[in-house]
Amino acid sequence: MAHIVILPGDGIGPEIMAQAVAVLDEVNTRFALGITHEQHVLGGAAIDAYGLPYPEPTQKAVRTADAVLLGAVGGPRWDHIERSIRPERGLLAIRADLGLFANLRPAILYPQLAGASTLKPEVVSGLDILIVRELTGGIYFGQPRGVRTLENGERQGYNTDVYSESEIRRIARVAFEMARLRQGRLLSVDKANVLEVTELWKEVVSEVGRDYPEVSLTHMYVDNAAMQLVRAPRQFDVIVTGNLFGDILSDEAAMLTGSIGMLPSASLDERGKGLYEPCHGSAPDIAGKDVANPLATILSVAMMLRYTLRQEQAARAIEQAVGQVLDRGLRTADIAEAGQATVGTRAMGQAVVAALREQAAAL
Ligand code: IPM
Ligand code: MG
């Protein structure tokens, strides 16, 4: 038995989430998982309903849930409101509140989509990178922060990049554990030639590495890592880095795979409870048009089943169903090659559900 809180969010969130829930319900029945779920609001939808991006009913529900499934938050409609209560703050607040310090962002190239990447197929084929991003520290949360007015009347904006040893150590452990289960190669990304905070990062990650002799650890400055990701991305297995660098590099890595619309993510606390969401944003420009790709959210359901609910078989079934619909040539607009026919959000979700039913029937 597990209880899930669903947060559809804003923009394309509700329509992609409807498809993800259909997939969840399908595996729930087929594998008799006994999962129950309820919906709450976060971000802009919460601002509309409660005047706050992370309101109390949502807080209460997610704190007791076994896992949280999120669509996406934000949109131009809420961009003018006071900074401290914008939709994105809801996302940051839930990450901090639940202690979701470990953000896993896989960038996997589906062989069926090799032609959809802007990079040459020979550069990206077989790509399988896992970015482990620290998610509750660094410059995103460091104090002091703000915009102040100096004596001369000029305004000055400031933020603080800060990491304590314990924060670095716990994210490093997650990354080494992941690397151990994969190809055994870990890259730690820093800017230790300039920033003291990342000099400490590098030092502590190296210390943790002594407990993992089977993992080969290397270090790279973030500018070089950004370059290497487009030059020769297959050199990477697991990449661990801080909050801000991880935000940037994970979008870059996502795009290597052809579309950010394919990539799920997990944000885990110390005990493996997690929030699962697609890597992409709320895409307000295409919201409500039935063109968004629901696969990243559907694959986030698979990650949730694997990492928090420990239902590997159900997770695999979903991933396999996604592979089946891609094999059949179904493409939403974001993953279509020039001239290829496209399907909408609903049709793509329904095709995944149908593929799951075919799997069950074939058993
Ligand atoms: C992400 C997003 C968020 C972040 C925004 C929406 C606050 O870009 O999850 O990568 O910067 O962490
Ligand atoms: Mg981002």
Image (cartoon, helix red, strand yellow):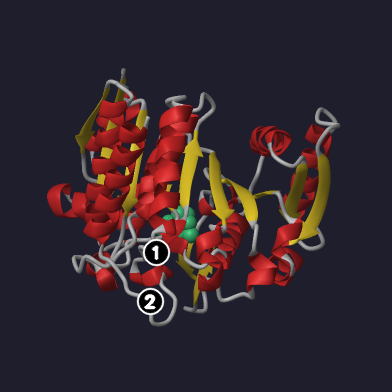
| Three-letter amino acid code at the position of disc 1 | Gly
Return the x and y of residue 46 as percentages of the image width and height. 21, 49
- Quadrant hosting residue 77: bottom left
Tag 2 residue: 340
- Residue type at numbered disc 2: Gln
Q: Left of 265 or right of it: where is 120? A: right
Q: Residue 80, relative to residue 59: is it above or below?
A: below
Frontmost residue, 29 versus 66: 29
Earlier-in-chain disc, 2 versus 1? 1
Secondary structure under tag 1 reads loop
Name above or below for residue 66 compared with residue 334.
above
Residue designated by label 1? 329
Task: Report whether residue 150 is seen.
Answer: no
**Is 208 left or right of 71, judged from the image as shown?**
right
Question: Which residue is at the front of the view, 227 or 203?
Answer: 227
* Residue beneath the point at 79% across and 51% down: 199
SS state under label 2:
loop
Q: Is mark 1 within 8 Å of ligand 2?
A: no
Q: Is residue 297 left or right of residue 210?
A: left
View quadrant of ligand 1: bottom left
Between 283 and 23, the residue placed more toward the observer is: 23
Q: Residues within 10 Å of mark 1 (few under 14, many from 20)?
A: some
